[in-house]
Image (cartoon, rainbow, N blue to C red):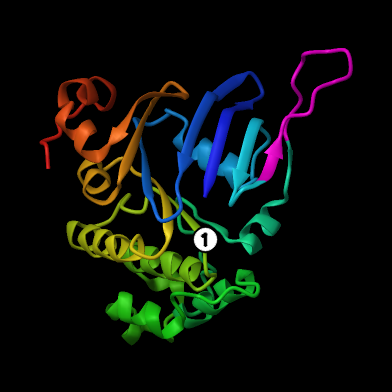
Amino acid sequence: MLDVTDLSVSYAAITAVTGLSLTVADGECVALLGPNGAGKTSTLKAIAGLVPHTGAVAFAGAPTARNSTARNSTARRPAARMPADRLARAGLVLVPEGRRLFAELTVHENLQVGTTARGGRTPTYDLDAVYELFPQLQALRGTRCWSLSGGEQQMVAIGRALVAAPRLLMLDEPSLGLSPRNVGVVASALRTIKATTSVLLVEQNTHVALDIADRIYVMAQGGVRMQGTSREIADDSALLDAYLGQRVAAS
């Protein structure tokens, strides 16, 4: 579903990601773990076509970004890439950190916005299915999103992405800032979603990521430092601790 090779992202003189490669198979849930500043968000933004980068990105077997090389030169230019809106309409859908909802629109109106990126794909989740996935949104259908709690906003953001019929759903820190109860609600929803949709998840909550994901990439200083199945990474808790600064019990 996704094949990223030798990805690098720089902002002026700051290198955020360097030489990163990863894959997400069709029907697989993959998580990126790592401390703040590891390059996780920059990786998602590059894959989604939102920031300049070098390297190659292929989605659903087709290249979305590929390096160009100057004639008679080995210098790499920023990858020529498909615009972010075309990627979304092709089924590569990002739920960004911070949710980015339309604050003055209601819950239902925000969900309806997601249908604009659906194209001709048949969604696994229509509007009714989103309300079934997140029942507490049902009573909030007519509520403007600025008045929602952080957890409720995150549910709307995920729902808006789902009605776009994603072939690959990318989520950036979906549990960040949520109450323990809402972390559980979002995690439960992601377990359901991954049964039908490929997922690439950036998450600092290692327990959530290890519980949900099939495979893990651990990032530090802009690159991948560990990778393996969730079981393998959890069992290697001493090494994981060196990168994340926390102990992880094998699940």
Splitting the image into 4 quarters, where does residue 117 fall?
A: bottom right
Q: Is residue 11 left or right of residue 235?
A: right
Q: Report the front residue among 30 and 46.
A: 30
Residue 167: x and y, percent? 52, 61
Quarter of the image with the C terminus is top left
Q: Which residues are magenta?
A: 63-79
Residue 37 part of the magenta-drawn span: no
Q: Does the magenta portion include 74? A: yes
User: Image point 18% across, 34% down: which residue?
Assistant: 234
**Which residue appears at 47% of the width and 82% of the height?**
108
Above or below residue 50? Residue 105 is below
Residue 130 picture quarter: bottom left
Tell me the residue that label 1 is attached to.
167
Taking the spot 41% from the left edge, 56% from the top edge, the residue there is 27
Q: Position of residue 54 (x, y in %)?
A: 67, 28
Could you say where residue 121 lies in the image, as x and y percent from the top left?
Answer: 59, 73
